[in-house]
Amino acid sequence: MSELRIAFIGCVEISESILKHLTENLIPGCQIVGIVTKDESKINSDFVSLEPLGASMNIPVHLYNGDLSAMANWLRSIQPDVIYCFGWSHLLPADILQIPVLGVIGYHPAALPMNRGRHPIIWALVLGLEATASTFFFMDEGADSGDILSQDFVVIDPEDDARTLYMKLTETAKKQVIAFTQELMNGTYVRKPQNHQLANYWRKRTKADGCIDWRMGADQIHNLVRALTKPYPGAHCTYRGEEIKIWKTKVRRDLSLNHLEPGKIVEVVNEEIHVKCGMDILVIIEHEFSVLPSKGEYL
């Protein structure tokens, strides 16, 4: 293919990072012919509109407002050979998937075919996984079920949280996009069908999932906190009837306090709050307590 016309769909931080990287390292013969994005989102805590970036590069932009028919008509008008859909919390209907001759490439930060579905970065951390993956695939009418185009595994270190893992995945994805864009140009790309028998689907996270239950072990609560830290909404507990956000923690091993009840504050040191859990102690390092609780109180 002597020319590759790319349409780009996205509305989160990773969308912006990949689009910037793609335009700064654009392969000769490739052209970004249009961008679909939003001007606001109530469902993406890492929301970023791509409209300013598109304007700065003189790329036509379509602002999606829920009208899929208008979006499909606009995409047809710019005649893309391929559509990149990275960071978009909506399934695309068949009439959009069928527009580009090469198909629509989606992105899912998990080791497909496993761990399809919602909030893959959050669930990977909550579950204490030691690795995940940056996966690009040909979108079909299912959720994360199309043939894999590119997949690189990413190690999850014990000190990683939502922000650091997000950045690791972003940096990995940026390299993959350049590589498979060249393969699409050359016609050397490979489609790897997923083994659907290995698939599972992670559900949508609810606010209740972020509520700390001190009967859990300190390791489990720590994983919950690091999973929901910024750019996500944060884990929370209740103190004196007020919901308190918890942003950063660490685990303190202390078998001598196993006789204490979960939720009891064992000490407060320099604004760090040490709380007895079902097993071990959780040290709350970054939080939104307006008034520090005292030793002996309960969360």
Image (cartoon, helix red, strand yellow):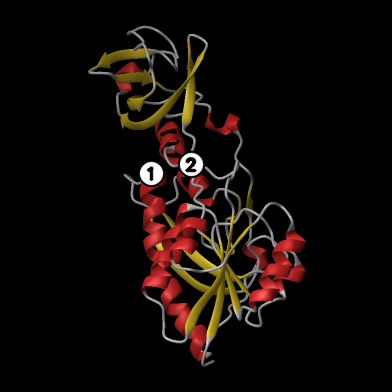
Residue 256 picture location, percent across and down = 30, 18
Crowd band around label 1 with a 10 angstrom C-alpha radius: few (<14), some (14–19), many (20+): many
Give the quarter of the image for residue 268: top left
As displayed, is residue 213 above or below residue 266?
below
* Residue at 57% across, 49% down: 39
- Front-lying residue, 37 or 122: 37
Q: CA distance from mark 2 to mark 1?
A: 10 Å
Q: Which callout, 2 or 1, points to the residue nearer the camera?
A: 1
**Where residue 161 is drawn, which disc sits there?**
1
Picture coordinates of residue 26, whole percent (x, y): 41, 77
What residue do we see at 38% from left, 44% from top? 161
In the picture as drawn, the residue positioned furthest to the left comes out as 270
Q: Is residue 182 left or right of residue 118?
A: left
User: Which picture quadrant has residue 265?
Assistant: top left
Percent x, y of residue 75: 67, 70
Which image quarter is the C terminus in? top left
Q: Amino acid at mark 1?
A: Asp
Q: Nearer the viewer, residue 6 or 248?
A: 6
Is residue 31 found left or right of 95 in the rendered image? left
Q: Position of residue 99 (x, y in %)?
A: 70, 76
Q: Disc 2 marks which amino acid?
A: Val
Identify which residue is drawn at 58% across, 78% down: 192
Which label's residue is closer to the chain start, 2 or 1? 2
Label 2–label 1 contact, CB within 8 A: no
* Circle 2 Cα neighbour tier, 10 Å, few/some/many (<14 / 14–19 / ≥20): many
SS under mark 1: loop
Secondary structure, mark 2, is: helix
Q: Is residue 105 above or below residue 142?
A: below
User: Can residue 127 be spotted in the picture?
Assistant: yes
Which residue does the numbered mark 2 point to in the structure image?
126
Q: Is residue 133 in sight in this rendering?
A: no
